[in-house]
Image (cartoon, rainbow, N blue to C red):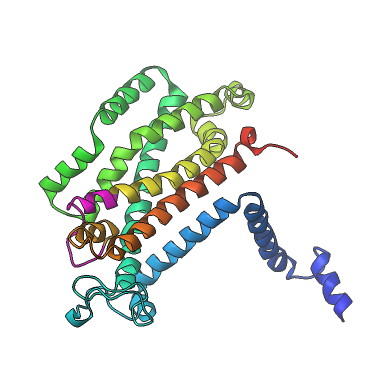
Amino acid sequence: MASKIAADILVPGEFPFHREVVLPLRVLSGIGRFAARKPLGAFGALIIFLMILAAALTFAGFADNITGYQYDDQVLADRFQDPSWAHKLGTDQTGRDTFSRIFHGSRVSITIGFAAVAISQMTAVVIGVVSGYYGGTFDFFFQRIVDLFQAVPGLIALIFLYSVFGPSQLILILALGLLGAPGASRVIRGTVISVRQNQYVEAAVALGASDRRILVRHILPNIAQVIIIGASIGIGGAILVESTLAFLGFGLPPPFPTWGRMLNDSRQYVTHPLLAIFPGVALTLTVFAFNVFGDALRDIWDPRLRGSR
């Protein structure tokens, strides 16, 4: 019986569930190889997964069931408590549970980070691909626009937009996305110019392939890894900028918690350093995780950095 089951699993095409069994094994094997080659990148991926899970649970309304408290529950009798079984990370100046507030704060960081980078990368792909592939007038026109946007101080522009339109998560996402696009488009443009010089692209042009086919079949697949790596690193930067704005008082309005606002509130209570340490650690770990995960992806996908045994 055991030999028959083993034969069914090992011999492809002889039973209908072969693909369903092999595919998860290949995925697990790939994850294991990645963790073995890049343990720091795997650690970053684990932190990212936990952050996304916490944000998803917050969106679904299950966060309070995990933390045991709502983020805005104020119990003045429990002010400035140290970490304990009742409050895993202690309480703040109004008796609110710190763990619950950090848990809910992941929703803001993940939402703004992913949404802003999605906008910046899509805009950068359009600008970088058109500019790098067509060159000439298109390249000159788009690069002057890129130079204009890169000359604008990003933090000052964000504060100005907040002053004009008010504290809004949508405004912050759009501003971060548009301000991050010029720098990302430079990288994509350089990669497109490099790919454009390859012989298979020249052969496609000689055979009369349309620009659309060349872009879809030859250019975009070969710059996909650059886009993914840039996005993974850019998410950490967007989260850091959002926390900086919140620390300066330009973040989302209370009572919804953000890590930057928690750091800002802790400045008035220097005798209770845990109020700043816990959100600071959460912010540092998140940005660090995205950076090392992006570096690991770059090392694996770039043949010049793979090395050999």
Q: Which residue is drawn at the image coordinates 31% and 44% (left, top)?
A: 177
Q: Is residue 26 above or below residue 137?
A: below
Q: Place residue 84 in its image quadrant.
A: bottom left
- Is 235 positioned to the left or the right of 98 in the image? right
Q: The C terminus is located in which quarter?
A: top right
Q: Is residue 165 above or below residue 299?
A: below
Q: Is residue 275 above or below residue 246?
A: below
How many numbered circles are shown?
Answer: 0
Q: Place residue 263 in its image quadrant.
A: bottom left
Residue at the far left in the pictured view: 164
Tell which of 42 and 20 is nearer to you.
42
Q: Position of residue 50 (x, y in %)?
A: 46, 64
Q: Position of residue 171 (x, y in %)?
A: 21, 50
Q: The N terminus is located in which quarter?
A: bottom right
Tell which of 260 and 169 is nearer to you.
260
- Is 169 positioned to the left or the right of 40 in the image? left
Q: Position of residue 239 (x, y in %)?
A: 34, 51
Tell which of 282 and 45 is nearer to you.
282
Question: Is 248 contained in the magenta span?
Answer: yes
- Is 19 positioned to the left or the right of 59 in the image? right
Q: Place residue 92 in its image quadrant.
A: bottom left
Read off the magenta span.
242-257
Q: Which residue is drawn at the image coordinates 27% and 77% (left, top)?
A: 70
Residue at the far front in the pictured view: 271
Question: Is 241 contained in the magenta span?
Answer: no
Q: Position of residue 227 (x, y in %)?
A: 47, 41
* Main secondary structure type of the part rendered in magenta: loop
Tell which of 105 and 197 is nearer to you.
105
